[in-house]
Amino acid sequence: MKVTYMLISLVLLLACSKSDDTPPITPIEEEEEPIEYVINCTDDSFSAIPVQCTPELLAENLDVVTWNIENFPMQSNTVELVADIIRNLNVDIYAIQEIDDMDAFTTLTNSLDGYEGIAYDVRGGIELGYIYKSSEITSFGSPIELFDSQSSPFPREPVEVDITHANGLSVKLINIHLKCCDGSEDRRTDASEKLKAYVDNNYPNEEVIILGDWNEDFDTGSSFSNFLKDIDNYIFADYPVYDGSGDDYSYPCTGASYCPSHIDHILITDELCDNLTTTNTVRLDDCVSNYLTQVSDHRPIMISLKADN
């Protein structure tokens, strides 16, 4: 299946005066050739559609979710609500961001029969973690924290882990939560460059997923243009969500100029592109009462991957 998207960036050409007597030349803006973003390695079954609380999942696929659960737990009933959501979604593995209370996270994972969970103190009080279904994730390796002592690009250290699914697919997950907000574009650009160099140098031919709260969309001038331009080696599986209706964005805020925003992403290496079957925004706020005030201000983003041929 061929899905085409266009990213436009501008280059500012500056001319300098030849002498003090020569009037300055007015800068001229010229457009670069458009970058054509094409996901063309999937087959005709690939789809990108929003789902609500009970997505139709195939048992033979690996289902992966990134989910920022906003200063978990937000309210006294948040643990119970998140547990109910995880049971209903029935997904194989979650990369979690913004765990504020480690004890509450332990209570959550202990309440989920058939699931295991682990969280990491990665600086800043809003931690990263994983929750996975032990019957489907047959191997969960020893996680490692990346980019220690590099707090400018990574205010929360990424957490990498190797997993194997029951269908035989083995992947490396790198869970990230980049610096938020306007004014931090340089820090996110630095993070993106370091992440790409890390994977390029260490896993040039392996199946890798970088997922989490990237805190920026794919607009012109994106901090992640290094990945966007390298479509032969990296694919943002959720790009169709960004290119579609804002109703399906991962951050359904209101009342600000940047609302809604699509800032949670799942990036896969090209070795996984022919495994990709679906990308979904899970619109929990459509079916969970008070989701945005009692669970999270972010929606989960999910992909499904079939086994290697």
Image (cartoon, rainbow, N blue to C red):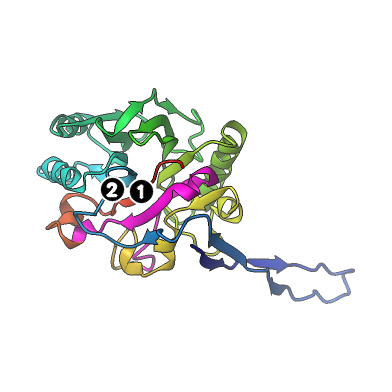
Q: What residue type is labelled 2?
A: Leu
Q: Say the numbered circle drawn on residue 304.
A: 1
Q: Which element is circle 2 on?
A: loop
User: Where 3 falls versus 60 (above or below)?
Assistant: below
Left/right placement of residue 249 relative to residue 271 reads left
The residue identified by callout 2 is 58
Nearest the viewer among 254 and 229 is 229
The stretch drawn in magenta includes residue 147 = no
Q: Can residue 120 be seen in this view?
A: no
* Residue 83 higher or lower than 298, as above or below: above
Pointers 2 and 1 in contact (C-beta within 8 Å): yes
Examine the rendered structure and indicate whether residue 163 appears above or below residue 82. Answer: above
Q: Does the magenta stretch include residue 269?
A: yes
- Give, as a single range, the part of the protein colored magenta: 257-285
Percent coordinates x, y for residue 16 in the rendering: 82, 67
Q: Nearer the viewer, residue 84 or 273?
A: 273
**Location of residue 99 in the rendering, given as x and y in whole percent from the top left corner:** 27, 37
- Tally of marks: 2
Q: Helix or strand or loop: what does disc 1 sit on?
A: strand
Residue 166 pos. (x, y %): 33, 33
Name the amino acid type tagged 1.
Ser
Q: Can residue 13 be seen in this view?
A: yes
Q: Which of marks 2 and 1 is nearer the N terminus?
A: 2
